[in-house]
Amino acid sequence: MYKALYRKYRPLTFNDVVGQEHITSTLKNQVNAGRLSHAYLFVGTRGTGKTTCAKILSKAVNCHSPVNGDPCNKCPSCMGINSGSVLDVVELDAASNNGVDHIRAIRDEAVYTPSEVRKRVYIVDEVHMLSTAAFNALLKILEEPPEHLIFILATTELHKVPATILSRCQRYSFKRITVEDIAKRLEQVALMEQITLTSEASALLARLADGSMRDALSLMDQCRSSQTIDEAQVMSCIGLAGAEETIKLLKCVESGDTETALNILDKLYMAGKDPGGVLGELSAVMRDITVMRMAPKTGEALLSGTFSLKMLRGHKIPTEKLLWCVKTLQESVAALDRSPDRRTAAEFCLIKITNDQFFTDTDALLSRIASLEAKLAGGAVISTPVPAPAQPEPVEVTEEKPAVKPVFSAPTVTEKPAAPIVKEEPAPKPQASAENGDTWQKILKELDPPKARLLNGHTPVFEENRIIVNVGTGFAYNILNNPDNMRMLEAAVTKIMGKQMHVIITDKAVGSQPNTDKLDELRKFGNVKFR
């Protein structure tokens, strides 16, 4: 019967465990010195070696001739524990045995001395799944354990374990295994299995495993359709879009080419790629580009490794838009499982991030502003189509032919004098002093950078109890007039000015007056009579 690779190559000694030297060295020293605890708690994500180390420890404490803290795997105790024939070493899955009756049964039989080995060991996997009553029953045996008893608890969710249990255990935190360590282990297993595994394929499998050795071995087992495993085969078996196709999608987002983006998704979908995986890879490349920009000196060590540095450089998409797109992609991926049509949901997500007109929330508008600023900085000319002026409709005039030759008389203006027109003097505009300019800069420093950038460059007018800022029409006016943004702006003004002042965001210049020349002409026209 075929045995899965992760089971076939499960470590049998502490020295075989990869990436957890800080734990294995401590456990070996305890075995050598005979300073064993009665309760251990192993914490870490899946596939990092918690249950494996628990089984090795159960062998080491019962081994007849341990080698530097490692079990020999040759004595009857080690061989019996490996085969599962030793009944004194019990592995319990708390996910399916989480009731108080199961723990009470363990407590009742734990008082008896082991029949085959020196120490009775209970390995409780996923201990956080125990019920409250079961935890209380377990606490009793942990408080006063017999000399021959050892508990090894394992969990992936430490926050669900009661503090009373934590305080009675030695806790060991298992970290995610590095990509380098996983890739090296995969190459060792491939060599023993006589599989040709390329370095690119091993690195890709290691990155996809996300720190889990078990996942990495399972993925390699899945790709083992032939005796040669390369990067293309890994992408084909697992359903990845590939770095090149993902970069093409990124360029569609950058240029706003929705049509090409949909065609790429259709091509990948027909090739058997999962829509969620495609969106996830697009999110990953955007994340890598953002990390490179935010941490130019140390960013290379933080990259996912799926994309080369050449692929990540040279993109002009603004960081604000990257952040918004990553947020939108992650929300869409999370909602795919609830969607009746995964393909349609993925298509709508691509339409949203490639087309600026669907930006609706504040973050999206700020992202759109950043895109326009980037285009202007690059020398692009952004023109807005101006509608043609409306032409007056022609008025059809019908003339009756008079029987007698008409005599025309010129219109005369009545002698009634025109009413005097009194022009109102425009109100003087409040002037912004240098002191007010300094105060305005202090107010802007109290705001978050995106909103401060929208207000910067506009000269405010300070009056007795209010401040008027003309930002013109467009995005800035719409965004800043949001009630939440106005509250934050007025709070910043109150903090700096020391008194409460009303802030007015307007799209018109302060003190502007109507054109009185047109009114004069209309008044004169009212005094003309025709006869």
Image: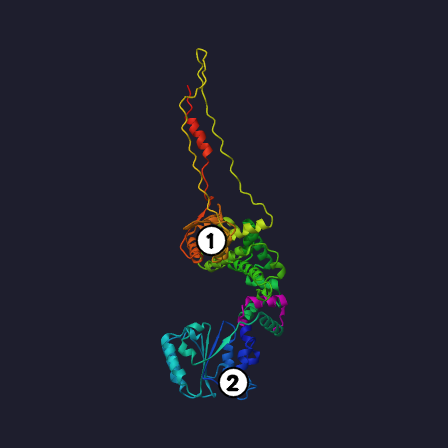
Amino acid carrying label 1: it is Thr
Q: Up-down: is 114 above or below 46?
A: below
In this orientation, which residue lies closer to the viewer: 133 or 437? Answer: 437
Residue at the image point whose x is 49% and y is 73% from the top: 44
Its colouring scheme is rainbow
Task: Name the spot of residue 360 as percent of width and height, x first.
Answer: 46, 51
- Asked if residue 421 lies in the magenta stretch, the reply is no
Which range is magenta? 193-214
Task: Name the spot of residue 84 as percent of width and height, x first.
Answer: 49, 81
Task: Name the spot of residue 49 as percent of width and height, x first.
Answer: 52, 75
Q: Residue 362 bears which disc, if any?
A: 1
Query: Quick one: quadrant of the C terminus?
Result: top left
Q: Is residue 419 left or right of residue 359?
A: left
Q: Residues within 10 Å of mark 1 (few under 14, many from 20)?
A: few
Query: Quick one: quadrant of the N terminus?
Result: bottom right
Q: Determine whether the residue tagged by mark 1 lies in a helix, strand or loop.
A: helix
Q: Nearer the viewer, mark 2 or mark 1?
A: 1
Q: CA distance from mark 2 to mark 1?
A: 58 Å
